[in-house]
Image (cartoon, rainbow, N blue to C red):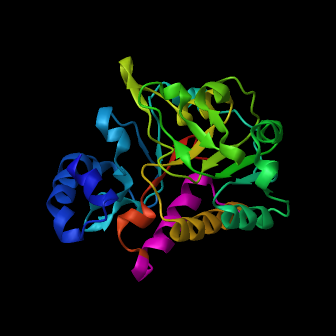
Amino acid sequence: ENYWRGVVEYLDFDDIGSNWLDLSRYLIEPISEYLTKESLIYFVPYNLLHYLPLHALELNGEPLIKNNPVAYLPSASLIRFCQNKGSGKLESCASFGVDFEDEAEKVAELFGVKPYIGSTAAKEKVIEACTNKDIIHFSCHGMFDDLDPLSSGVKLYNGEILTAREIFNLNLNAELVTLSACQTGINENSPGDELVGLTRAFLYAGAPSVIVSLWSVNAKSTQELMLEFYKLLKSGKDKATALQKAQVKIMDKEEYSHPYYWAPFVLVGDWE
């Protein structure tokens, strides 16, 4: 928890260093003998570890993501559930923008489509557009409901909320859902360490892969990361490698070297 707060509150590395090293020592070093450079790592976190950017912990003095693509699963049983789902393509895209219209426009431009901004990002139109696209990208705020996690959702046009409860009832054929928003990965732990929230909702609705954020993100660095990620996807990289290389490119910029900027996004579900 101290490490998570240190990153989210953008403390200096010196202030979070001891927590960082302790976690790396306990969580990463024990698996180091099984790792080779560029090999895929799947994390199945437990309890509060769901909320930590484990890919940002260090191995041999470097963030793990520097040398290895990383994906996450809320439970090991979901790996088969996530495989062989979706469209199998990463071609068509629906890009929704509320409050972050510029990012939505740039993502849409990459795929040669018009963005859904303003009134076109109303809930009814969003649900309709989601049914037949390979990639669904939300440049919107996320909202988490502590009392009723299934009421958590994505804020759309005119204050409407696309809730996790509604998402569970969708029938998606999307290959990837990206929630480029604030704290979209925060969920509620229920018995069996399963998660209820946006991530689980989109997986259940049919998306094999979901990218979510672990904390409120910086708009500028997030836009740069997302555009780089999609460019890499379009070049033929798999999802895990595309996210890894995008994060490394962002962290290599001096102004974004702190993990607050490059570490919030995690790929949950199928890595391909």
Residue 252 lies in the magenta stretch: yes
Please determine whether, in this image, residue 158 is positioned above or below residue 61.
above
Residue 249 lies in magenta, yes or no?
yes
- Residue 160 placed where, x, y %? 67, 39
Who's the residue at 20% across and 62% down the image?
Answer: 16
Q: Is residue 259 left or right of residue 202?
A: left
Q: For residue 258, what is the image quadrant?
A: bottom left
Residue 180 lies in quadrant: bottom right
Q: Residue at x 64, y 67 (%)?
A: 227
Q: Position of residue 124 (x, y in %)?
A: 80, 36
Give the image location of residue 53, x and y in percent: 37, 51
Residue depicted at 58% across the width and 71% down the height: 224
Which region is colored magenta?
235-255
Q: Can see residue 67?
A: no
Q: Residue at x 27, y 61 (%)?
A: 59
**Vertical side of 243 occupied by 46: above or below:** above
